[in-house]
Image (tube, rainbow, N blue to C red):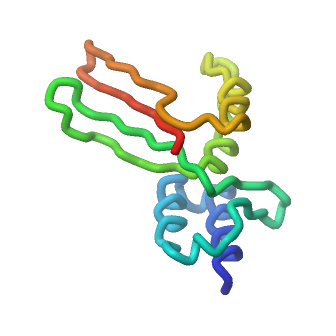
Amino acid sequence: MPASEERAMILRMVEEGKISAEEGSRLLAALGDEAQTVPPRSHTAAGTSFDTSTALRIRVSDAVTGKSKVNVNIPVGLVRLGLRFIPQSANIDAEKIMHALDTGLKGRIVDVVAEDEGTHVEIYVE
């Protein structure tokens, strides 16, 4: 099976809720060097386009010790999909995030220290 079909199958499983976005990200990463021969955009059977050329890196660490608590990469295509399901009550401007991704924004987009919880959260587009 060509890598592009494998990618589409993984993304379909995430979209259908059969696997989590993190599991999908790991599976996509496991395709390894084959991924470099696949065009950056692949399409699912439903016609949804996923950008697999960039990723959103989320790092959560202890603000005092710097010890990592979470370090995950999520393909931007999955981020776009997930933004569709954010309720309006979440007070998150999904349109603004989509615009930033559409314009090719790279680098750190969030850097927050929650001192009361002792947590440092960083989000990058790579």
**How many discs appear?**
0
Q: Nearer the viewer, residue 60 or 108?
A: 108
- Left or right of residue 58: residue 4: right
Q: Nearer the viewer, residue 126 or 120?
A: 126
Q: Position of residue 37 (x, y in %)?
A: 63, 75
Q: Nearer the viewer, residue 12 or 5?
A: 5
Residue in the image at 27% along x and 19% along y: 117
Q: Position of residue 71 (x, y in %)?
A: 36, 45
Residue in the image at 48% along x and 37% along y: 124
Q: Position of residue 122 (x, y in %)?
A: 40, 31
Residue furthest right in the image: 47
Residue furthest bottom in the image: 1
- Left or right of residue 47: residue 30: left
Residue furthest top in the image: 116
Residue in the image at 50% along x and 35% along y: 107
Quadrant location of the N terminus?
A: bottom right
Residue in the image at 73% along x and 37% along y: 102
Position above or below: 72 against 114:
below
Question: Which of the 4 image quarters holds residue 12?
Answer: bottom right
Position above or below: 73 against 82:
below
